[in-house]
Image: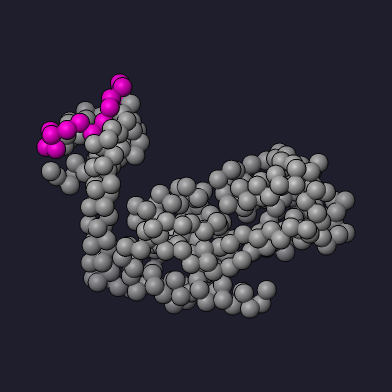
Amino acid sequence: MELLQLHYFLAVARSEHVTEAARSLHVTQSSLSKTIQRLEEDLGVSLFDRTGRKLQLNEFGRRFLRRAERALFELEQGRLELSDLSSPDHGTLELGVTSASVLPEILREFRKKRPLIQFHVQMLITQEMIQLLERGEVDYCLSSPPVERDDIECHIVFTDPILVAVPKGHRLADRSRVSLTELKDEWFVGVKIGYGTRDLMDAVCKTVGFAPHYVYEGDEPARLVNLVEAEIGIAFIPSTARNSRVHVHYLQIETHEVVREIALLWHKSRYISPAAREFREVVMDYFAARNLTE
């Protein structure tokens, strides 16, 4: 059994499609198929049920996938540890976020301490974030909602009230508070299903008898306040995402205490470098100070 075979197997197992897997690996389909065939010959079993170029993991494949992911995970942790030992002041932090509203301030503080460390940040929906965490492909995630998994450490760092953002000329712009039932006929702008705040507020609105009518659904939470300012619709905005530079008015939600919990997540078995541990301290200190001022 070769390491290359395991890498190719994981690519096919995750996409369940030869063409897509070959494209992601930058190899030919025939080369990929032959490598998977040799792996199955080495193991003495078929790992996939085949329908044309579409593959589906069978019971043997599902069991082997868990072992293969674990083996490659440990090898990657070894590579990270050796890289850190050889160049402790360099490297890249892999970060995932479901909302990036507070991330610039956190990264600014961390860069003062570790100016040579680079970042790679991905905006993710919750399910994507869980997958990357479980594969050990990110150092940390800032997530709302928190995630409970046996192999994931979850530390809640902040409780963030949800506000209602309306344009300055809106009928509610002279109010400080509003009930959810008053919003049932409004047009909303929001992120897509799968983002924590969207899923939370859809569920809360359902409990009071309505589903928000979305005229815009996107992947960039930071864009919502600009759409509210342009009078496209109103929005549910976490307090940490308030933007004082745009002409938007924010109202508290009465009768329902609606908050999102922000959590810092990491894989329990992932190698944590000194720089990554320092980043974690910066995150904890940032939200501890914010909790004192709220």
Q: In the shown orientation, is residue 163 left or right of residue 84? A: right
- Residue 223, placed above or below residue 32: below
Residue at image location 31% in from the left, 65% down from the top: 271
Q: In the shown orientation, is residue 216 left or right of residue 281? A: right
Residue at image location 34% in from the left, 52% down from the top: 135
Q: Position of residue 36 (x, y in %)?
A: 20, 34
- Residue 52, placed above or below residue 123: above
Q: Position of residue 61 (x, y in %)?
A: 26, 37
Which quarter of the rendered picture does the N terminus lie within? top left
User: For residue 42: magenta?
Assistant: yes
Q: Is residue 18 visible?
A: no
Image colouring? one colour
Q: In the shown orientation, is residue 123 left or right of residue 270? A: right
**Quarter of image, res 34:** top left
Residue at image location 74% in from the left, 58% down from the top: 256
- Residue 173, placed above or below residue 114: above
Q: Position of residue 57 (x, y in %)?
A: 30, 34
User: For residue 5: magenta?
Assistant: no
Instruction: Tell me the magenta residue range.
Output: 41-53
